[in-house]
Amino acid sequence: MTLSDILRILEDTKAQQVLLLCHHNSDPDAICSAYALQNLLKKVKPEITTEIGTGQGISRLAKNIVQNLTIRVNLKPNVDKAQAIILLDTNTIQQLGDVVEKVAKAISPIIVVDHHAVHPETQKLCKLCITNEDASSTCDIIYDFYKEKNIKPDENTAKALFLGMAFDTRHFVLANSTTFKAISDLVDSGVNAQECLSMLTLPMDFSERVARIKGCRRAKLLKVGDWIIALSHVSAYQASAARALTDLGAHIAVVAGQKGDNIEVSLRCTREFSEKTGIHLGRDIAKPLGEHLKGMGGGHAMAAGVNGTGDIEAGLKWCLRLLKENLAKNE
């Protein structure tokens, strides 16, 4: 599946207004991939009007990038007006926050471009799914679209692609050879790597610091075989707290949070855990956990998330059960 497949759908449906929609609390990969695709569509289909939207805000880092690159993001996108909807870095409509119901009922064609496997329920709603789990980021896939059309991204677009790749690979720690080749091309085309990377460095705010400390203080540690599993809960910044726990020494961290009846769970693991166990957090843990919690889950091999309903303690226990079952399979 390529950009040509997207263009064919836009032509067949005569879509003139295209909404590029990102997940709630959109991160740099989501916003930057949407921005890069928007600029590419302007070049190959100049008659089309495009809008970048998100249903429930963008992250602090993404805000910093939006301000530096002057990217326009509509925080209240008009889903009903869109004649085609392209989901960027979003493998399930449950990640769309405030606009999830409108997207679920949309009669316009829905297209997914992501480096995660699409959730089966979302796949049923889509006209086209372009996914590549071998890609380090969604920006990698968009960069391939540029190469497909032999179009060189302009300076701002090149910076956006670089930033999306850098963010999703944790400053290239998780990058593969394809990403490094793309980064080399972008740097050769004029991207100042040091300048761009500074946009991904913000002082941690007080609330996140507190959440990390609480997450570590509340952590319950279990040893399963050779692996240390950390289970914890905080009211916000679950992903950051999970990263803190793996940085401190846990092989895998699961941090949950609750707002009313809704539960959010973030999972992170080390590369060693992922490679030696063969466990894919998104596919093997988050997806079945999301189904158990009557919600949805998914993500990467080493980072995943779940949204659902129920009790935190019960959710963490079920997650631990899934981990133990998968570890037993891979012994």
Image: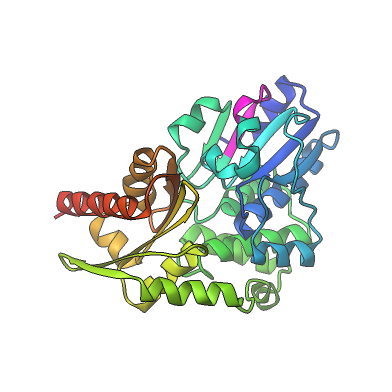
Q: Quadrant of the C terminus?
A: bottom left
Q: Residue 13 in the image: state x and y as whole percent.
A: 72, 21
Q: Nearer the viewer, residue 106 or 294?
A: 294
- Specify the quadrant of the image occupied by residue 316: bottom left
Vertical relation: 46 (above or below) 225 = above
In this orientation, does residue 5 appear? no
Name the residue: 67% across, 57% down. Answer: 58
For the point 52% across and 39% down, the residue is 92
Image quadrant containing the N terminus: top right
Please give the count of numbered marks on the rendered protein: 0
Any part of residue 37 in sight: yes
Percent of width and height locating residue 82: 75, 31
Please report the residue visible at 63 percent of the width from the left and 48 percent of the height from the top: 142
Colour style of the rendered protein structure: rainbow
Which of 241/124 is in front?
A: 241
Span colored in magenta: 104-112
Residue at x-position 58% and y-position 41%: 113
**Residue 19 versus residue 182: which sits nearer the camera?**
19
149 vs 274, left or right, is right
In-image side of 296 versus 95 (left or right)? left
| In the image, residue 252 above or below residue 319 | below
Task: Please tell me whether residue 111 belongs to the stretch shown in magenta.
Answer: yes
Where is residue 101 drawn, in percent x and y?
61, 32
